[in-house]
Amino acid sequence: MRNTNVRKLTMCAMLAAIYVVLSLAFAPISFGAVQFRVSEALTLLPVFSPYAVIGVTVGCLITNIAGVAMGITMPMDILFGTLATLIAAVLTYLLRNVCIKGIPVLAALPPVLVNALVIGWEITFFFLPEGASLPGFITSAVSVGTGEMVACGVLGMLLVYTLKKTKLDKKLFE
């Protein structure tokens, strides 16, 4: 008999660990105004399970704490970055059933849009030397959104497609 609570907790912990490892392995491009977090591809995994929301959120939290500890980012990223990931993951879960040819393509939008707006705002207000401005926000949002588009729209959708095609989604998330 399988203990489903242990299985769910293990899945959350594994997703968090994978998120952290991917983020820190690519640390030079995972933080800052121009960023590309490979680990953000995992934010599409809530299409398979609501428990993935917890895993990627905890992974983002730990990553952002590590970023502060390494002096790569600022403490407010712990709050805003983690909150953006949580909101995006929940919205991804809610869009999981909106599919085209069996693929939840709209599920890739929340991580792109939420991170572009929230992290773009955070960079504008806390990191830009010239301070808050509309052009600064637009530049930051487009920069973050572009990285998210590649991580989620390309890598994340490829991950979702591959898991579905190989039926690993059923083995891993049910």
Image (tube, rainbow, N blue to C red):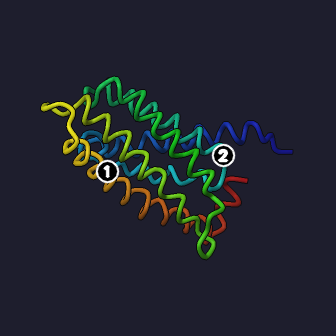
Image-based side of 167 in relation to 122, left or right: right
Above or below, 169 relative to 166: above
- Residue with the mark numbered 2: 50
Please say if 1 is above or below 74: below
Q: Secondary structure at mark 2?
A: loop
Task: Spot the residue most to the front.
Answer: 134
In depth, the one of 136 and 108 nearer the eye is 136
Q: Rounded to the nearest whole Å, what is the CA distance between mark 1 and mark 2?
A: 25 Å
Residue 86 picture location, percent across and down: 52, 38
In the displayed structure, 6 sits above or below 43; it is above
- Residue type at tag 2: Pro
Where residue 79 appears, x then y in whole percent? 42, 27
Looking at the rendered structure, which numbered label has been put on residue 87? none
Q: Residue furthest left?
A: 130
Asked if the residues shown at circle 1 and circle 2 are in contact, with their CB atoms under 8 angstroms apart, the answer is no
Q: Nearer the viewer, residue 92 or 72?
A: 92
Position above or below: 95 against 6: below
Give the labeled residue for mark 1. Answer: 36
Residue at the right extreme, as displayed: 1
Image position of 124 (left or right of 155): left
Q: Residue, x 35% and y 25% (percent of image)? A: 76
Binning the other alpha carbons within 10 Å of mark 1 as few (below 14), some (14 to 19) or many (20 upward) gives many
In the rendered structure, which amino acid carries the disc numbered 1? Phe
The secondary element bearing badge 1 is classed as: loop
Q: In the displayed structure, does residue 35 sit left or right of residue 165?
A: left
Depth check: 164 or 112 in front? 112
Q: Position of residue 169 (x, y in %)?
A: 65, 60
Q: Position of residue 55 (x, y in %)?
A: 57, 40
